[in-house]
Image (tube, rainbow, N blue to C red):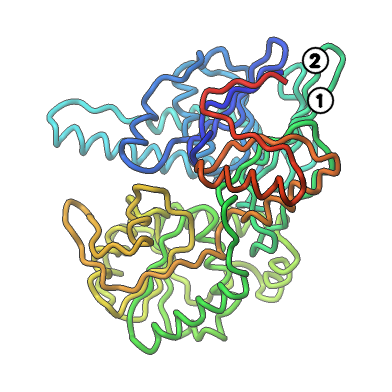
Amino acid sequence: MDIEFFGAAGEVTGSCHILRVGDQTVLLDCGLIQGSRKDEARNHEPFPFEASSIDAVVLSHAHLDHCGRLPLLVRRGFRGPIYVQEAAGELVAILLSDAAHLEERDAERESRKTGKKVKPLFTLEDGEAVMRQLEGRKYRQRFEVVPGIEVCYRDAGHILGSCAVEVFASELGRERKLVFSGDLGQYDTPILKDPECIDQADYVLMESTYGIRRHRARDETVKEIGEILSEVRAGKGNVLIPAFAIGRSQEVLYLLGKHYEEWELYRFQIFLDSPMAIEASKVYWDNHHLYDEEATKLRKENGGMPLLPNLKLSQATEDSMAINRIRSGAIIIAGSGMCNGGRIVHHLKHNLPDARNHVIIVGYQAYGSTGRRLVDGNDTVRIHGQDVQVRAKVHTVGGLSAHGDQDDLARWYECMQNRPPVWLVHGERESQLAFKDYMGQRNGAQVSVPDPGERLTL
Ligand SMILES: [Zn+2]
């Protein structure tokens, strides 16, 4: 068996690993590179393999940095099955159609601007082709991917339907087990169950996005959000929450619902201003069989989801534009999560120059993104070709991250009694090196940090 680390080695986006067992080739994830324009331009480059030579794809979860290059893979000739956890499959459909829309729109805009025909990275049609190749699977049911490779999905607690993947590879009469962590959530994440314990493996490919840090305790984060909201009530401003349509948006809504009385949220107008987040929320609300105990109980008490009686789902562009006229008392949850596009950008433009307003950053912000500039405290950010003054207060509440911190990651690993060797495949280099040291001291794990393109024979 060998593994080639094609994407996300030494960075946090573009997850894609090539697994070869006998004459079969399987991709673990096929993610999009996200971040600055220069980084994103790399998505147009050819794959270092023939798309038609891939036998199957196994997806860990429905984030673009894990599944966003599938439309390219299919367009370039991949015809095999794409395995995905069932609820994750519903989210992938939403994600790819939204991404294709944006690609087509940007290409059109670029074509008008330059006078040259600019092609989108992929189209709606490419996204639909992916959907026809998706094969939904349940958690904890082992299935054959290709001859010699079987897979079992385990809950990773990161977003709905997210998986750590157990890969059983048989070669020359011998079976070995590789575990690919996908993205791991925090323990006690709202709505979702904890990352599931996997008790043994021969090798582990593991993410380390937050391998360098510890998140603030969740209850402190929740307290902090409560304090920000009481400041907003007193100062009569608006609150902007840039959030990924899938995962963070639903978690934020849930948290607001849970503390509705305590935070006096009946005083606010709450908007989910993203057609995509609305669709994703519906998938979350429908798949309540995947909830943890608390969410199951709150849903039952409330008689269904969502928990917020004053939530407005803002579908049409006019609805979104109308929100821009509200000067006070609005909580606006909108994408994109890193503020590089989407409706949040318009809200930032209208709200950043006013010191009464607040921005609450709840998710990871990659280098080069507008969100990262806000987190880093820049006085101005560039939006639609203009410098916009940042007078609004920017709060970063790390405790809501969809990713586990170094403790969570180590705890998940330590389920594996036999302490298998680890390769870190997802994380900025600095974080990976710190996590390697941390693991060495904490549990003596043998941890390696591969380079992109490195090939490992096991
Ligand atoms: Zn993810």
Is 447 or 81 nearer to us in this picture? Answer: 447
10 Å crowding of disc 2: few (<14), some (14-19), many (20+): few
Residue sitting at the far bottom: 234
Residue occupied by mark 1: 176
Residue occupied by mark 2: 171
Judged left or right of residue 315, residue 19 is: right
Q: Is residue 87 visible?
A: no
Mark 2 is on which residue type? Glu
Residue at 56 percent of width and 85 percent of height: 261
Mark 1 is on which residue type? Arg
Establish if 187 lies above or below 434: below
Ligand 1 within 8 Å, label 1 CB? no
Residue 257 placed where, x, y %? 57, 74
Is 271 or 185 nearer to us in this picture? Answer: 185
Judged left or right of residue 285, residue 414 is: right
Q: Quadrant of the C terminus?
A: top right
Is 429 or 53 nearer to us in this picture? Answer: 429
Q: Earlier in the sequence, mark 2 or mark 1?
A: 2
Residue 179 placed where, x, y %? 73, 35
Place residue 273 in its image quadrant. bottom left
Q: Quadrant of the N terminus?
A: top right
